[in-house]
Every structure is written in structure tokens, then in C-alpha cells.
Amino acid sequence: MGKTLVDKIWDAHVVVSKPGFPDVLYINTHFIHEVTSPQAFDGLRRRGLPVYRTAKTHATADHNVPTVDQHLPIKEALSRHQVEMLSSNTAEFGVELYGLGHPYQGIVHVIGPELGITLPGMTIVCGDSHTSTHGAFGAIAFGIGTSEVEEVLATQCILQYRPKRMKIEINGQLKKGVVSKDIILYIISQISAAGGTGYFVEFAGEAIRSLSMEARMTICNMSIEMGARGGLIAPDDTTFDYLKGREFAPKGADWDKALAYWKTLYSDADAQFDKVLTFDAASIEPMITYGTNPGMGIGITQHIPAVEALDEKEKTSFRKSLEYMDLQPGTGLLGKKVDYVFIGSCTNSRIEDLRMVAEFVKGKKKADDVTVWIVPGSKQVEAQAKAEGIHEIFEAAGFHLREPGCSACLGMNEDKIPAGMYCVSTSNRNFEGRQGPNARTFLASPLTAAAAAITGKVTDVREWL
Ligand SMILES: CC(C)[C@H](C(=O)O)[C@@H](O)C(=O)O
Ligand code: SF4
């Protein structure tokens, strides 16, 4: 019987496998950032251990960094401390750091792919749930906890049970105004924020194949928001073209050898999945969330469900969620006033996202009472945007391209959405307090966010295209 892609990669990395125990899995690449690494380094120090493979460990500062005046000392004491600890720990243990001021600095899930560190067939971990992003290259990539970060730093291996495999096929073609963020918000709205629990999800089908690498990353990034352990997409020519010539990608004869292997990385035609779901791309419209988990999403023209339409057990959390959002069941969101627009995060802060926004806002002005934050995913994205004149289009529209970091995706740095305010956000989580205490989040695509920046309201971007 054939193998799934997940099994092919898994089997190539198992060091020890014993029935009834987790496998010992070799890890090709370990990304670290300032939030989940300090205790792991403390643990190494306590045990007197070095980092086993420093060259396979890559560090960046992203969560706690400010997104203006990065050349000045960080104002918030806790954030400053976290970032300083990453600098001293990486220096002590010999790990290269792309810290503030470095031309490669950025959100960990943006810099791995753009530097060609993330490659097909790899096992990749990071003490961060959205490590699933790297699965877009046909890699097994998943988030781990702080004690596992220590385990991987010390051994370059991790103990893991083999996951169940799910395939999600998106057939047909996307309609105008619908982009990859809408695909993933749609899937999660259909299967719920717990619908992928215990699975590694392979995304397939014509609509996925036709996506760029950056659009594929958006999908895999949010696979964990349906509870999955990770998501991945089989590599193809789009993947290989994206990787060729990148800083850390193999070169010359090494490239040819790697390419020959990468071409074997697909699920065999007769491979068995534990679950298969199929959706039609044409039935997806621009999506927006109304609640406090990413599964609470609707097509932009649709209405929030009525309470009566829900299961008894869902009703209480649904009511609580709408209370937090100060929204009424059974109503639509179109025309709802918006206070902030945040375009950024490891879901949607790459150059194609910024290009998409720039193309839409060119020649338009932002609404007077909306604050717009556009935060590139990395220094390289920022430099590219400037080289293309994208920052000037933003300035003319009334907003400013900030400096790279996680920013308002989570309230862990200076960029917080004030209490009670509504923010259309291209990030991946809309939990209570996620963007700041009592802030209210509408998750959407960069296009839908750009439209809200111009009108100051929740808007159906298709009316403008
Ligand atoms: C801080 C970090 C551990 C966390 C995560 O794991 O995802 C953050 O990146 C997030 O998006 O909530
Ligand atoms: S951008 Fe947001 S989701 Fe991504 S790593 Fe940073 S905090 Fe987590």
C-alpha cells in the first residue's frame, strides 16, 4: 500500500520506534524566539549541556519587539528583558541570532521560508504553535512546548506519537476577491476550531495547487486553528521555483540531489488517510469572523447565526462570545464601524500581502476615524516593499509601513488595540484579549482589511473590484 506524504517524511526521520512508546524523531531545523526559549536555556545550564547542533538552530526576536523606532532601546521592561535574554543566551550557546537591527530579523515563520532555511521533506519545530506555516513546503512542521525546546536544543530529537492523517481537498477555482485567507477561514468555519484535533492535514486539490507559496503559507499557518497538529502541502514546481537561489537553499550539485528527492514527496495515489474532506472553491466568499475563536466565521454577506440554530451545549459559549464582541445573533456585519485595521502577523505579512493591499489602496485615502497599522513580516519584506515604492502608496493613502514584528497579532508588545475597539485583522486568532485587554477582533484577508481601512466599515471588497 502507498504512503501519505506525512508518513514518508516521518519514516525518514525516525531514530527509534517501539510499540506503545512515542517515536524518537530527528529534527532538521529548530527555530527559537524570545518567548519560549529562556527556560529551555536555563535548563541546559542546569544540566551543564551544550546546544547539540548550533548550525541547525536559528533564532530571531519577534514577539516582544516594538514596530517603530527599533533602533532605540525597548521601552517596556518585560519586553526588553525577553529580547536581551535571547541575545545573551544565543551568544553564550553559539547560536546565530537575527535580532533587532539584523537585516534578516523578522517573524520566525516569515524568515525561515524567505531565507530558504525551510525546505521540503524536513522536520521543523519551534516553541510556537504557528510553526505549521512551514508545512507549505512539504515539511512536517509543528509547535512544541518550552520543555521540548530544551529537549531539541540538547539532542536535536523529539519524542512524538505519529499523528493521524487527514486530507482536505479544495477543488475548482476561487472567485474574484477571494484569497487563500478566505479558504482557511472557510474550512475552519465548516469543521470548527476543534475539527482537526489529532491530525496532520494535507491540503490538496486544484485551488491549492494554483496558489503561490506565500498564499500556501497562510493556509498551513492557520491549520492549527482547527486544532490540527500541523498542515502541509506537497511540494511542486511552485515550491522549487520559490526556493531556488535563496540564501540557505542548497546550491549546484546539492540542489540537483535535493530536487530529485523533493520530487518523491507526495502522497501515493493509493495512500490511506484517516479522514478526507472535500470543498468547492467556488462556494467560498470573502470571510470574516464575528466571535472569539477562528471557527466563528461567516461569508461577509452572511449573518451571525441565531442562537436557536445552535446545539444546546454551544449556546452558552456563543452568547458569552457575542457579549464580548457586543454583537447581536442573527445580524450581519456589513457596514459595522471599524476603529483599527491591522495588516500583519505570520499569517499575512509577506510581500504578496503588502502588494495586494497596495494595489487596492492605490489612489484611495483611508477613512478619517480608522487607525491603520501595516507591519511587514521581516526586514527583507520591509526592504522589498520600499524598493517597490509600496511604502509611498501607503503614505499617500494616510498610513505608514511600520517595522517588522508580531505587533498587534498579540498584546505582548507596545502595539495593542484599545479596550472596546473593533479591529479588522489579518492575523490568525480572535481570542478574548488577544490584541489587547478587551479589544475586539474581526479576522479577515488582507483585501477585506484594506477595504475596511478605506471605508472605515466592514466592507465587501468585491464591490470595489
Ligand atoms: C508566544 C507563543 C508561544 C505563541 C504561540 O505558540 O503561538 C504566539 O506566537 C501566539 O501566536 O499565540
Ligand atoms: S505573528 Fe502572531 S501568530 Fe505569528 S508567531 Fe507572532 S504572535 Fe504568534
Image: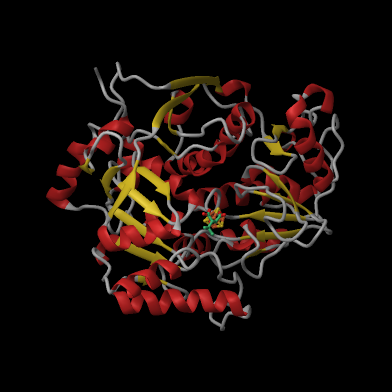
Q: Residue at x 51, y 19 (%)?
A: 278
Q: Is residue 465 visible?
A: no
- Viewer-side residue, 163 vs 406: 163
Q: Is residue 224 left or right of residue 14?
A: right
- Viewer-side residue, 291 vs 242: 291
Q: Position of residue 443 (x, y in %)?
A: 67, 44
Q: Position of residue 341 (x, y in %)?
A: 71, 54
Q: Quadrant of residue 10?
A: top left
Q: Residue furthest front?
A: 20
Q: Position of residue 11 (x, y in %)?
A: 23, 36
Q: Quadrant of residue 265?
A: top left
Q: Residue at x 79, y 22 (%)?
A: 309
- Give ligand 1's quarter of the image: bottom right
Q: Is residue 19 left or right of residue 82?
A: left
Quarter of the picture containing the N terminus is: top left
Q: Residue furthest bottom?
A: 73
User: Image height check: is 44 above or below 310?
Assistant: below
Q: Is residue 407 visible?
A: yes
Q: Is residue 347 left or right of residue 154?
A: right
User: Image height check: is 277 above or below 177?
Assistant: above
Q: Position of residue 93 (x, y in %)?
A: 30, 75
Q: Is residue 31 left or right of residue 128?
A: left
